[in-house]
Amino acid sequence: ETGVTQSPTHLIKTRGQQVTLRCSSQSGHNTVSWYQQALGQGPQFIFQYYREEENGRGNFPPRFSGLQFPNYSSELNVNALELDDSALYLCASSWGDSGNTEAFFGQGTRLTVV
Amino acid sequence: AQRVTQPEKLLSVFKGAPVELKCNYSYSGSPELFWYVQYSRQRLQLLLRHISRESIKGFTADLNKGETSFHLKKPFAQEEDSAMYYCALKDTGGFKTIFGAGTRLFVKA
């Protein structure tokens, strides 16, 4: 059984560019959630995917979008990057969409926008 | 508005002393509450949830709906408890988790 893995671990982008972050969910999990964690803050919920469909979204603009694939891995895409998008991006996988099962987190991708 | 507040950014205690990490929440409904922990150079992981009413690593947390609090307690702190602790609330739909800003616990020898 493998844990949640995210790639890349670090990334530097220029303002206005687009970025794609990747997450492989833990074996047997069909739900992936994405979070943004700014320095000194707790994680903020971006959105959740269950069986390839988005089933919940936080207060993030449409330029934050995602995908979940048939193998339940996921991508987070951010268009038109802004300096404030610099943060640690976390994904977490779990089983089911009820939220009652434990979520397992990846190690995160550190995005720096310059 | 749904909100989780952890009033202390840093809490420093001596080994063997009791520790209490405070968490207050704002939520209209029946929340599901959690404590997550992040040890140095490790990923965020679930410590405990209120519905389980369990004790993990000597930590307990009681949901007080009247005071809208979910404080984390341990009677005798250990050096290995030093970590970042996040209180979190899951909404009724079960898909959105709201985290507090976190409290860094430092247990001194």
Image (cartoon, coloured by chain):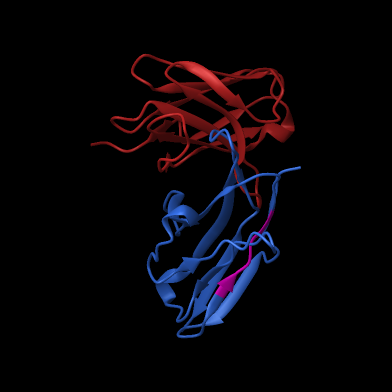
In which quarter of the view is residue B24 placed?
bottom right
Q: Is residue A69 above or below residue B1?
A: above
Q: Chain B: what color? A: blue
* Quadrant where the C terminus of chain A is found in the figure: top right
- Rendered location of residue A3, percent (x, y): 32, 38
Q: Residue furthest right?
A: B1
**Where residue B16 sits in the image (x, y, percent)?**
45, 85
Q: Residue at x 48, y 69 (%)?
A: B82
Decide if residue B24 is on the left or right side of residue B46.
right
Q: Which residue is most to the left?
A: A1
Q: Name the dominant secondary structure of the magenta segment.
A: strand
x and y, in percent, of residue A40 in the image: 66, 52
Dividing the image into 4 quarters, which one contains the N terminus of chain A? Answer: top left
Q: Is residue A39 magenta?
A: no
Chain drawn in red = A
Q: Is residue B22 magenta?
A: yes
Work out whether A75 lies above or below A29: above
Residue at 56% over, 55% down: B86
Residue A23 visible within the image: yes
User: Looking at the image, which residue is at 43% across and 61% down?
Assistant: B53
**Does residue A114 appear anywhere in the picture?**
no
Name the side, left or right, on which B22 lies relative to B105.
Answer: right
Please give left or right for residue A72 compared with residue A35 in the image.
left
Please state if A15 lies on the left or on the right of B53 as rendered: right
Give the number of marks: 0
Q: Position of residue B12 (x, y in %)?
A: 59, 76
Q: Nearer the viewer, residue A68 or A84?
A: A68
The span picked out in magenta is B20-25
